[in-house]
Each structure stands twice: as C-alpha cells, then as structure tokens.
Image: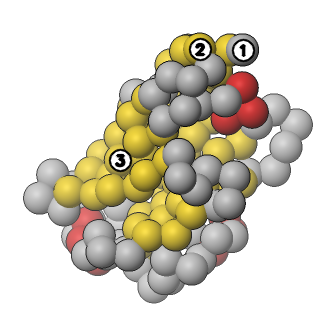
Amino acid sequence: QVQLVESGGGLLQAGGSLRLSCAASGGTFSGYVMAWFRQAPGKEREFVGTISRSGVWTNYADSVKGRFTVSRDNAKNTVYLQMNNLKPEDTAVYYCAADRSRGVDTTRARDYEYWGQGTQVTVSS
C-alpha cells in the first residue's frame, strides 16, 4: 500500500506559476501510474493529468493542456505538477492519485486506488 503526500500549494496571482509535489512511500513507486486531480468548491473531482510508470507517456485534460506538465522522478518517489499561466478557474484543492493496474488514459477518479490529502491552490485575478 502506498501513501501519498502533496505539497507546494499556495496563493498567487493569475499568470503565475507553481509546482506541486507528491511524495510516495510504502510501495514500489515505479509500479504505479500517477495522476493529478483537482476539486473546486461545489464541484466534482476533475481529472488534470496522468503519467506512465516510466514517465514517458502523459495525458492531460483539455483545460490544462499546454499550461500544465506532469513529471516524475522514480529515484525520489515523487511526482510533480508544474502549472504555468495560472488562471482563477484553476483554483481548487489538488490531489495526487496512484494505481497499479491502470494506464495513462484513465481519467476517472473512482478508478484510482490511492489518494493524497490534497493541497490548496488559489489563483486571484
């Protein structure tokens, strides 16, 4: 069983950049597809991006494509979400998730086995 801890959230102005980290422990990190989701108040949890076990393949939601980048460092058991050109509508709690059997095309939150506690990102206009 893997434990996930996100960090790096904060408050910033529109147009800024932020990098979130998600540290994993308790499992073989390279055996998991990793994903980022977000949830704004009153809304359902929304897919942001995924990365394959090797880090070669990624998949993004249309709303973040070209602005956000998911990467991973298997030696450090960490997955990252680099967010550029942030917009007020990106405001949400951001969660990382892991699964042993899915692929990078898995975009439904219910398909992921493990979750972090989330980190708040607030973008002001």
Label 3 Cα crowd, 10 Å radius (few <14 / some 14-19 / many 20+): many
Residue in the picture at 29% in, 70% down: 55
Question: Residue tagged by mark 1?
Answer: 125
Binning the other alpha carbons within 10 Å of mark 2 as few (below 14), some (14 to 19) or many (20 upward) gives: some
Say left or right for 119 vs 20. right
Disc number lying in front (3 or 2): 2
Q: In what element is the residue under mark 3?
A: strand
Residue 115 seen = no
* Residue wearing tag 2: 13
> In the image, which disc is placed on residue 97?
none
The quarter of the rendered structure image containing the C terminus is top right
Seen in the picture, residue 14 relative to 58 is either above or below; the reply is above
Question: Which secondary structure lies at badge 2?
Answer: strand
Is 18 or 78 nearer to us in this picture? 18
> Could you say where residue 101 lies in the image, as x and y percent from the top left?
45, 85
Left/right of residue 90 with respect to residue 6 in the rendered view: right
Determine whether 91 is above or below 34 in the image.
above
Identified by mark 1, the residue type is Ser
Q: Residue at x 68, y 60 (%)?
A: 62
